[in-house]
Image (cartoon, helix red, strand yellow):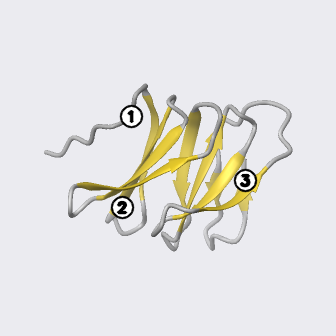
Amino acid sequence: EQVWRGHSDEVLDVCFDATGRRAVSASADATARVYDVPAGSLAHVLEGHEGEISKVAFNPQGTRVMTASSDKMCKLWAADTGACAQTLEGHTDEIFSCAFNYEGDYIIT
C-alpha cells in the first residue's frame, strides 16, 4: 500500500499514464503532482494555476499532462520535467474536464 501526501487541500482527480509508471493528482490547492509509481515518490509539483484544478489527464504517449482549472485556463506540462509547455486561455468560466484524443494530437475541454 502506498500513500502519497503533500496537497494542502482536497484531491479532486487522479489518473495513471498508459504504462502505469506515472500517476498525477489534481487538487483544490491549485497544484497537480506527478508521481513515480514504481519508486513510490513525488516526481514534480505542477504550479501555475490560480484556482483549483478539477481534472488531470496524460496524453496517450505519457509525455504531457493536461490540467483544467477554475481559473478558466488549461495547461499542458512536460511529464518528465514538470515544466509548463503551454497555457490555453479563452474559456469564460471554470473548466471542469479535459481529455486527449486517442492519438494525443487533439484536446477537448
- Tag 1 residue: 7
Q: In this rendering, would 95 be left or right of 37?
A: right
Instruction: Tell me where residue 50 sits by quadrant.
Output: top right
Front-most of residues 61 and 9:
9
The picture places residue 91, in percent across and down from the top left corner, at: 83, 40
Q: Amino acid at mark 2?
A: Arg
Q: Residues within 10 Å of mark 2 (few under 14, many from 20)?
A: many
Q: Amino acid at mark 3?
A: Ile
The picture places residue 108, in percent across and down from the top left corner, at: 73, 53
- Tag 2 residue: 22
The relative height of residue 41 versus residue 5 in the rendered view (above or below) is: below
Sequence-first disc among 1 and 3: 1
Nearest-to-viewer mark from 3 and 2: 2
Nearest-to-viewer mark from 1 and 3: 1
Sequence-first disc among 3 and 2: 2
Front-most of residues 68 and 16:
68
Sequence-first disc among 1 and 2: 1
The quadrant of the picture occupied by the N terminus is top left
- Tag 3 residue: 108
Q: Which residue is drawn at the image coordinates 63% and 40% (left, top)?
A: 49
Q: Amino acid at mark 1?
A: His
Q: Which residue is drawn at the image coordinates 63% and 53% (left, top)?
A: 99
Total marks shown come to 3
Q: Which residue is drawn at the image coordinates 56% and 41% (left, top)?
A: 55
Mark sitting on residue 40: none
Q: CA distance from mark 1 to mark 3?
A: 26 Å
The picture places residue 27, in percent across and down from the top left corner, at: 48, 34
Q: Are marks 3 and 2 in contact (CB under 8 Å)?
A: no
Q: In this rendering, would 38 be left or right of 82?
A: left
